[in-house]
Amino acid sequence: MIVKQLIVGPLLTNCYIAACEDTLEGVVIDPGDDAPRILGEIEANNFTIKYVLNTHAHFDHIGANEIIRKRLNAPLALHPLDIPLLKEKGGAMMFGLDSPQGSDPDLELEEGMVLKFGTCSLKVLLTPGHTPGHVSFFAEEAKVLFDGDVLFDGGIGRTDLPGGSMTDIMYSINEVLFKLPDETIVYSGHGNPTTIGQEKATNPWLV
C-alpha cells in the first residue's frame, strides 16, 4: 500500500492518500484543507480516487471535502453519528473560524464495513470518544491504521469538545486499537506516525 501524508490547514492536520501499488486506485482520508495541494498530489501520482473518507467531522478534517468529492466524482463517507457535526461546519465557529458548509455523506460508515480499492482494503472500526461517530480505518494485510484523533504519538485525542467522552476514548484505545498487532503503523490525524506497540509501552496517558 502506498501512503502519502500531507499536512494541511491551520491546525496542521494530516490528510492521507492511500493507494494500491498495482492499480493506483486509492482513497483520500480527512481532506481538511488545501484542496489544490491534495488534488495536485493525486494527479502527480496518477491515482484514481474511489472514496473520500472522514474519520470524523471536525472542521480541520473536512474543510476540503466538497471540492475533492466534486472534482474527483468520488463518494464521501462518514459515520452517521457525526453527520450533525458535519452540518455545523465541524464546530469551526467555536474557534472563531469558518468552514465550508458540507452536504450529507454519500455513504454512511458502519462498524465492520470493508472498503476496497485495487487489491487493498480498509476495515471500518468504530472508535468514539473524540466525537460520537469517530471511526478508524485498518488495513489488515499492510498492518496500517488511520485513526484520526484517537491515538497519537505520545498522546490521545481531546474529549472536552461537544460529544467527547473520556470513557469512550479509553475503551476505543484499549479494547479496539490495542487489540491490533503491535507492529501496526498508526497514522494519526496530527503529528508523526507511531505503532500500536510503541504506544502500549510508552504513551504516558496509557501506561
Image: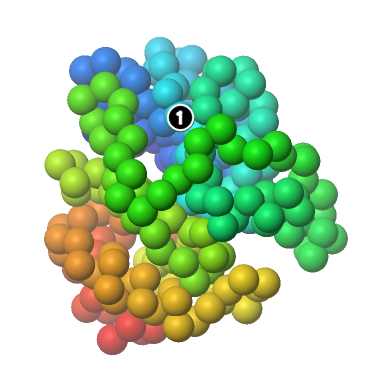
The residue located at (71%, 39%) in the rendering is: 102
Evaluate whether residue 33 shows in this view.
no
For residue 50, what is the image quadrant? Answer: top left
Which quadrant holds the N terminus? top left
Q: Which residue is mark 1?
A: 51
Q: Is residue 74 visible?
A: yes
Seen in the picture, residue 94 relative to 11 is either above or below; the reply is below
- Which is nearer the eye, 189 or 86? 86
109 and 24: which is toward the camera: 109
Q: Residue at x 29, y 65 (%)?
A: 177
Q: Which quadrant of the figure contains the C terminus?
A: bottom left
Q: Say if 49 sits above or below 89 in the image.
A: above
Residue 21, horizontal then vertical, whole percent: 24, 23
* Location of residue 80 in the rendering, given as x and y in whole percent from the top left corner: 55, 51
Above or below, comparing residue 51 to residue 182 in the picture: above
Q: Label 1 crowding class (10 Å Cα cut-off): few <14, some 14-19, many 20+?
A: many
Residue 31 position by quadrant: top right
Residue 200 in percent (x, y) is at 24, 75
Q: Amino acid at mark 1?
A: Tyr
**Where residue 93 sits: x, y (%)?**
82, 59
